[in-house]
Image (cartoon, rainbow, N blue to C red):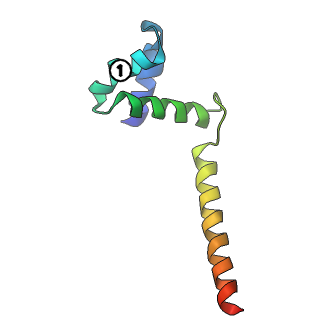
Amino acid sequence: MRERAVRSVLDHEADHSSRWTTCQSIAAKFGCSAHTLLDWVKKAEVDAGKRAGLPADTAEKMKALERENRELRQANEILR
């Protein structure tokens, strides 16, 4: 559903005066808020490389590595 909503915003953006008005127009059809839809569109653009930011897959990998690092530090503290 999220992908369809994002695609709908991108497809109909030219029909509105701004991306925000596009999101306001489309959000109710997908049962979400305009803010949520706008966030989804921005994240999709980051993931596609069209907007600066950290792609979702990279962010997930970083979280996993940070969690592993934290666990290893805790284990090292216990062993000391």
User: Residue shown at 60%/34% (left/top)?
Assistant: 46
Image location (x, y in percent) of residue 66: 64, 64
Residue 70 in which image quadrant: bottom right
Image location (x, y in percent) of residue 47: 59, 37
Q: Nearer the viewer, residue 36 or 7?
A: 36
Secondary structure at numbered mark 1 = helix
Residue 6 in which image quadrant: top left
Residue closest to the far bottom? 80
Identity, as a three-letter code, of the amino acid under mark 1: Gln
User: Residue shown at 72%/92% (left/top)?
Assistant: 80
User: Residue shown at 70%/85% (left/top)?
Assistant: 76
Image location (x, y in percent) of residue 13: 46, 14
Would you call the spot at circle 1 few (<14 residues within 10 Å), some (14-19), or many (20 or more)?
some
Q: Quadrant of the N terminus?
A: top left
Q: Nearer the viewer, residue 32 or 10?
A: 32
Instruction: Tell me if 32 is positioned left or right of 2 in this view.
Output: left
Image location (x, y in percent) of residue 56: 57, 46
Instruction: Tell me if 17 is positioned left or right of 48 in this view.
Output: left
Instruction: Tell me if 32 is positioned left or right of 10 in this view.
Output: left
Above or below — where is 58 with respect to 52? below
Q: Which residue is mark 1?
A: 24
